[in-house]
Image (cartoon, grey):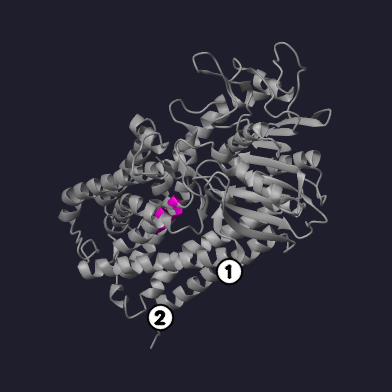
Amino acid sequence: MKSIPVKPPVTRRNSFWLALSLVLMIVSAIGASAVQTSAYNVTVKDMRWETASGKALSALLYKPNAASTDSKAPAIVLAHGWWNNKEMQDANYVELARRGYVVISIDMYGHGDSDYLTNSDIALGGTGMYDAVKLAAELPYVDADKIGVSGHSNGARAANFSVAIDNEADVQLIDAVFLVDNDPVYRDEANDNVYFNLYGDRPTGLVADQYDEFFFRSYDADGTAVTAPRDYITTSNAQSFLNYGVDPAEEGEKREANTIYDDGGSIRVVYTPAQTHPWGTISKQTVSDQLEFWQEAFGAPVEIGAGAQIWQWKELFTALGLIGFMIFLLAFARALLSTRAFAGLRQDVPEATANSRTGLIWFWGATIVSALFSGGSYVALSQASWMNSIAFNGAPTIFTQGAVFFIAFWAAINGLFAIVIMVISYFLFGRRNGLQVRELGLLPGWKKFFQGIGLGALTVAAAYGIVFFFSWLLNTDFRFWVVAVKDFEPDKLWIALLYLPFFLVYFIANSVAINVFNRFTLRGKEWLNTFVLALFNALPAIVLVIAQYTTFFITGELIPEFGGIYSIWLFPVILILAATAVLSRKLYRVTGNPYIGGFINAAAVTLVSVTNTLTVTY
């Protein structure tokens, strides 16, 4: 009698994926810790203290073990950009600390674990930077004559705020400044807007990206840009900065990019890499420019070439952790199906709908129409004045995280549109062709519905429990560039409740669409169907990003009326929409319940969103 091969049980296969996810997260945390401590030659402390501005400031302190009261080291205060947090400066603090600098990387007020920012106090304490400078000056192992500030984007604006505060102080604390991806201050508003030198005799450097979405343009009297960022070095602004604030129409020599000018010990330099604004946080070239500048300004306690960088290994390790986190969400949820509490959720799923010409026309038609609506609605929202007032916290609303509201609202209207498409599809095609929505899980019953929510909540809580554990033990998290899973303060849970309903509408509707209405076997392969749906989930974002940057690189400017921040916000969306489609499909195949994956996706994405952005109160 011929034996029939038995397919391994899902639990056995799932045990492998669960173990792999845990291994990836453990390797991630240990590896990232080893890199950021320079093989434990640097001590890392997660700090939160009440500042002179009366707010609590959160920061990471990187102290080289060699720094002491007898061997004081230069200190550099770092600040991230708007809608980011202190970990976004990891490339800089890893490299600076291993070269012997004491580094304080702050959560600017309103970000991360620092106190909220009020709309009227944006410049308070240099948005937290100058308050951190004051702390650095009091540390016994810091050379108080060598304290520098550096920031990316609005972190550079925080540096400008801080220099202005320092200029008015009885004792000046800031000795050097390095700005990344934000304009220096060129003109004196209090003195007829003439060119002037805000930075005095402090060594001051600048990274001005040739394809910066926001800065390094010159404008005419009507506010129209007359020079592109790639032409910045030729402008009067750049020339005035390099010539210490003189009016270039009257005096000063013509100076070039990527050259360090030293007039009596006060250096000036402008670096102009051919890169975009967000790439400045993950650019080897920009890190190299930063290291070169501080070597010139302060000297490095440990001399290591600017090009010899290891932060990329930390990025690799934290990316492994991010992959492990995503696998864990799926594998742990499936593991819970083997427990008594959730065993009732496990069931066989009907075979995918057989291909027919009419069915495939509906499949492709609905998929393409949904993708077009997704892209079109995103652009339309970006141009809506009422939305911009909320997104940029210009109007007082309960939605204190404007950027999250923009993405959440966009997601919700796409979820509602998906529901409309599914209703039309069902009545015009599905019902006539035997589509049994109850059998396919659209109506699982209240008991299974709430069981599924319980399973999803427990899964997300367990995943974040691992994140919190490694943050507490090793000061690491799971991230890659603009996508980050990190620990958070309890207040973020209350903020998350504001946005969770919006994300639930989208992710539940999306999971129902993917699993109930669009389960076709393309070319006889269900994985191909899953791939196509995941691709089309992310395709509108991909197309908009490609269109934006193709236009930018060819013309030197962005697509008219489509601001650069909107394409930047799409970077994490691409990964999230593709990954969540796969997760919901995989969970559906063992439960026949589309709501479980939808809830897990909505909860996880909401927490990722509200813990990595700006919170403004009114």
The kind of residue on which mark 1 rests is Ile
* Mark whose residue sits in front, 2 or 1: 1
The kind of residue on which mark 2 rests is Val
Q: What is the number of callouts on the image?
A: 2
**Label 2 or label 1, whichever comes before in sequence order:** 2
**Picture residue at 40% right of the left edge, 85% below the top:** 3
User: Percent position (x, y) of residue 269?
Assistant: 74, 31
* Residue hosting label 2: 6
Q: Is residue 282 visible?
A: no
Q: Is 18 located above or below residue 304 in the figure?
A: below
Left or right, 203 with reference to 342? right
Q: Identify the image quadrant of residue 162.
A: top right
Span colored in magenta: 604-610
**Picture residue at 38% right of the left edge, 64% below the top:** 586
Disc number placed over residue 373 in the picture, else none: none
Look at the image and tell me in which quarter the C terminus lies: top left
* Residue hosting label 1: 26
**Picture residue at 30% right of the left edge, 56% below the top:** 508
User: Percent position (x, y) of residue 235?
Assistant: 65, 19
Query: Tag 1's secondary structure?
Result: helix
> Label 1: how many residues lie within 10 Å, few (<14), some (14-19) or many (20+)?
some
Residue 607 painted magenta: yes
Q: Identify the image quadrant of residue 98.
A: bottom right
Query: Tag 2's secondary structure?
Result: loop
